[in-house]
Image (cartoon, rainbow, N blue to C red):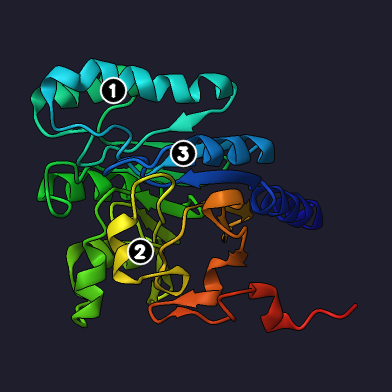
């Protein structure tokens, strides 16, 4: 009898471990002076990968003008209309929410509150709101902790919010701020942000932090300044694979007139930039013929 129970226990553990086996896509900022044709190209590529769902990291509309609010959301919906079969989870950005009217519009047009969580398989995703703040206010951190505490066995755990205030904290050597403390305490795998129109990747205490690069928001100022691929300035989206409790991120630069189609594992990029030849990531592996 004991051997049967052990077998059943191992079987259940095996099923639990194999529960996660899915892909999702992460789309970066569209606005902050949107560049024509970029976001639509990104959406087309994302749709061709057939992800189980899509995450956005905020800044869907140009925003900041009440009188343009409804028109801009209509333009955003028109872009996504061709891809209505995709399940999309939206995050609020500072261009989406600047006052109470725009907050209500975000909820109405996306179908989501400004903070919420969901599970896919055994993976937990928690979206919080930095729209009108420079970082996560105490109320949002309280909500985040509440969701993490309520799902102790979820794995992986992924946090999503727009403004990557963690970049300056880590650059200053600070690893004691509350967000990171919560991420460590509850075993968070990844923290995803947008806002900066630049790809940034850092790992602290086993937690992967990523500023998702622009998927359409302008980089003209950066490019005029001379920033380029090695500085994280390229139009892209991210393909994520979840297998069991593990999550893997592949960064895909768009091609055509607006990029070179470079693709690399996010682990091959740190705060100093790419660990591979920027012109051709494949050269780092010296593939045979």
Q: Which mark is residue 39?
A: 3
x and y percentages locating residue 280 in the rendered image: 64, 73
At 28% from the left and 23% from the top, the residue drawn is: 72
Q: Which mark is residue 52?
A: none
Q: Report the Cα–Cα distance between label 2 and label 3.
A: 18 Å
Residue at the far right: name it. Answer: 289
Circles 2 and 3: CB distance less than 8 Å? Answer: no
At 74% from the left and 51% from the top, the residue drawn is: 5
At 43% from the left and 74% from the top, the residue drawn is: 206
x and y percentages locating residue 259 in the rendered image: 55, 56
Left or right: 2 as drawn, with respect to 168? right
Disc 1 on helix, strand or loop?
A: helix
Q: Earlier in the sequence, mark 2 or mark 3?
A: 3
Left or right: 77 as drawn, with respect to 11? left
* Residue labelled with disc 2: 223
At 39% from the left and 72% from the top, the residue drawn is: 231
């Amino acid at each position: 009898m004991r051997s049967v129970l052990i077998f059943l226990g191992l079987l259940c553990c095996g099923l639990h471990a194999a529960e996660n086996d899915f892909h999702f896509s992460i789309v970066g900022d569209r606005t902050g002076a949107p560049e024509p044709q970029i976001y639509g190209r990104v959406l087309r590529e994302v749709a061709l990968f057939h992800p189980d769902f899509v995450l956005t990291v905020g800044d869907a509309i140009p925003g900041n003008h009440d009188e343009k609010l409804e028109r801009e959301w209509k333009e955003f919906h028109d872009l996504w209309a061709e891809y209505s079969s995709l399940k999309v989870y939206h995050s609020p950005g500072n261009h989406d929410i600047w006052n109470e009217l725009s907050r209500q519009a975000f909820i109405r047009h996306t179908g989501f509150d400004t903070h919420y969580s969901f599970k896919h398989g055994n993976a937990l995703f928690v979206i919080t709101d930095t729209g009108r703040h420079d970082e996560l206010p105490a109320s949002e951190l309280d909500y985040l902790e509440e969701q993490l505490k309520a799902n102790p066995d979820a794995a992986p755990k992924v946090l999503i919010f727009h403004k990557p205030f963690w970049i300056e904290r880590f650059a200053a050597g600070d690893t004691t701020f509350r967000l990171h403390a919560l991420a460590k305490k509850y075993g968070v795998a990844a923290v995803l942000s947008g806002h900066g129109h630049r790809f940034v990747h850092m790992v602290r205490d086993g937690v992967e932090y990523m500023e998702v690069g622009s998927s359409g928001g302008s980089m003209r100022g950066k490019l005029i300044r001379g920033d380029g691929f090695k500085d994280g300035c390229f139009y892209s989206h991210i393909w994520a694979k979840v297998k069991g409790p593990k999550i893997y991120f592949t960064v895909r630069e768009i091609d055509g007139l607006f990029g070179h189609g470079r693709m690399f594992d996010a682990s091959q990029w740190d705060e100093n930039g790419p660990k591979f030849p920027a012109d051709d990531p494949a050269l780092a592996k010296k593939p045979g013929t």
